[in-house]
Image (cartoon, rainbow, N blue to C red):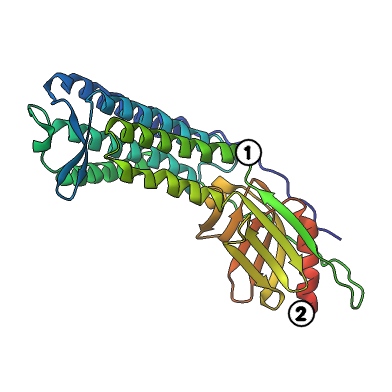
Amino acid sequence: MSATPVSRPPRARLPLSMWVVAVALPLVVGAMAVALQLAWLPQLPDPIAMHWGSSGPDGYGPAWSTPVLTAGLSLGLTALFAAFLATARQPAPTASHKFLAVLSTVTAVFIGSVVTASIAVQRGLSDARDAPAIDAPMGIALGAALVIGVLAWFALPKTVPASAPVAAPAEALPLAPGERGVWIATTRVATRAVVAILTAIAVVSAATVFTITVTEGEAWPLAVAPLALVAAAGIAVSWRVRVGPDGLLVRSLPFGWPRVRVRTAEIASVHALHIEPLSEFGGWGWRWAPARGFGVVARSGPAIEVQRHDGRRFVVTVDDAETGAALLAAYAQVSR
């Protein structure tokens, strides 16, 4: 017999101040940065320095490329954060929603400040190779972004604690003496989350290709960023979930790593519950949250939660979680 499924919470309506911090403020910061860069174009050398190494400028490109890059990143990243927040469900705003809104502003301030500062130090130069180091401006930009982030955090409404999911204890599936069964399912990240992940990769990749192109290949080390995103996305999109006499096994597809195994002897309890990725884990994929433990959070919906005897918890979202939880509870019961 399986547990009763938990109903899905309604979509949340975030306060206006969240959208101001997550969308309006970053767009204003981006517009101000682009305006300054355009105003300074006549005072800049041609080409300008666009990348600095340990010994000074080592990547150059046309001056017009920096406002284009700033505008593209401002629009792309702000849209990405807005898309994440649009998936919010009750209760809201949680600490995860608030963090995403603040991170949107912090990212905009840091990127806008760093790129604009790299232009400011070249005003009046006849040769971009004479441009000074930008270590100090980068430090100031980071400090300013963090200060603004803290102020934005406290300016936003108080967070609503992420509601603990109503965990229905899994009723052990009746097994005859000596009977064995295996339950296997595949869980994939929801389409909208895949779109958000691909959008993030596309934004970073486009910015990287643009920068490498205008610097005639001299900024090639930046290509590491999109490759890292692709690798991270590849191990967090699809997972195989298996329940058998030896316990629960969850592994990433197609390579089988990372993987999590919880043996039946370790299991103290098994529950079926409903999980909201953004509210409870701050996103999708391989996640950890202070109040929830580790989890493979592929989508909003039913999930199996296992609590070990030492108190550690593990969650995996998967269709028909009630059946998998019931079989796992049966094997855990036999083990005890």
Tell me the amino acid under the disc marked 2.
Ser
Q: Nearer the viewer, residue 95 or 36?
A: 36
Return the x and y of residue 180 as percentages of the image width and height: 86, 71
Q: Earlier in the sequence, mark 2 or mark 1?
A: 1
Q: Residue furthest front?
A: 216
Return the x and y of residue 4 as percentages of the image width and height: 80, 53
Q: Nearer the viewer, residue 190 or 252?
A: 252
Where does label 2 land, which residue? 335
Quadrant of residue 158 within the rendered picture: top left
Q: Which mark is residue 5?
A: none
Identify the residue at image location x=25%, y=45%. Answer: 142
| SS category of the residue bearing label 2 | helix
Classify residue 236 as left or right of residue 136: right
**Whether residue 259 is situated above or below residue 82 in the rendered picture:** below
Give me the C-alpha separation between circle 2 and circle 1.
38 Å
Return the x and y of residue 107 as percentages of the image width and height: 34, 39
Identify the residue at image location x=82%, y=67%. Answer: 172
Can residue 303 be seen?
yes
Tell me the amino acid under the disc marked 1.
Thr
Where does label 1 land, which residue? 191
Q: Nearer the viewer, mark 2 or mark 1?
A: 1
Return the x and y of residue 240 as percentages of the image width and height: 69, 57
